[in-house]
Amino acid sequence: MIELFTAATPNGYKVSIMLEEASLPYTFRHLRLETKEQKQAWYLALNPNGRIPTIVDHDNDDFAVFESGAILVYLAEKSGLFLPQDPKRRSQVMQWLMFQVGGVGPMQGQAHVFYRYAAEKIPYAIKRYQAETSRLYRVLNTRLEHHEYFVDDISIADFATYPWVRSHKWAGVAIDDLAHLQRWLSTMRARPGVQRGLDVPVPRERLKQRSEEQRLDEGRSII
C-alpha cells in the first residue's frame, strides 16, 4: 500500500493523478501547509526538503520517495504503466518530464508567487515569469501539434504537466492562441482518473467554496 502525503497544489496533484490512473491502492494524508505541517520533524524524516508530495511504499520496507518527478518514475516502474520500456520512447518521456520539473513548474511557480502572493507587486518580476511561462507553453503547444500526448501515448510527462497548465489563469497567463495546448487540456480533463486525482486531498467542489484569503494563505506557505 502506498501512503501519500500531499496538499491541493499542482505538484501534489501529479501524484494523486498517477495513483488513480494506475489503479494503485493508496491512502493519503492532507498536510496543512498553512500551519507548516510539512516542516515538522516527523515529516522532515521522510522528506528532508520539507515540501509536498512524498510517498511511503509500505509494500517495499516503508521506502520513502520525495520530489514529484522521482515519485512519478517510481510509481511508473512499480506499476509498469505510463513509462515505455523502449529506450528511445522512455527517453522522450523523461525529456518532457524534466521539461516540466525543470522549466514549467519553477517558472510558473514564480509567476504564481509574484502575481498572486507577493505583498509587494514587482512589475519586472511578474512580467519576467509570466513571459517565460508563456514561452514554455508555446513549446508544449508546438509539440502537441502532431502528438495527442507528449509522447504519443499518455505518460507520466502528461500527468506532471497537466496540473500546472490547468492553473494558467492563477499565474495570469493566457492560452487563447494555443489551440493544441487547449485541445490537450480538454483531453486530459475528460479522463476519469485525472478527475479523481484532482479530488485528492480536497474535493474540488469544496475548494471552490474556500475564500480567496484562505487560498492565498496556503499559497504563501509553499514559498
Image (cartoon, grey):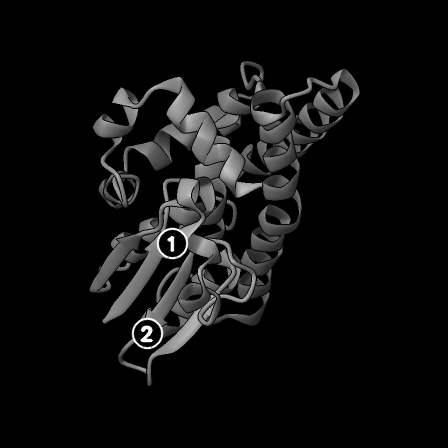
Quadrant of the frame with the N terminus? bottom left
Disc 1 residue crowd, few under 14, some 14–19, many 20+, Cα 10 Å: many
As measured in the structure, the alpha-carbon distance from the residue carrying label 2 to the one carrying label 1 is 13 Å
Q: What type is the residue that disc 1 sits on?
A: Val
- In the image, what residue occupies the spot 41% across and 27% down? 215
Please say if 92 is above or below 219. Answer: below
Q: Position of residue 133 (x, y in %)?
A: 65, 30
| Tag shown at residue 72 | none
Is residue 196 in sight in this rendering?
A: yes
Quick one: which residue is furthest to the bottom in this view?
61
Mark 2 — residue? 57
In this rendering, position of residue 44 left or right of residue 194: right
Instruction: Please give left or right for residue 47 compared with residue 60 in the image.
Output: right
**Residue located beneath label 1 in the image:** 15
On-image quarter of the C terminus: top right
Task: Name the residue at 28% across, 65% down.
Answer: 3
Q: Nearer the viewer, residue 214 or 114?
A: 214
Residue 72 lies in quadrant: bottom left
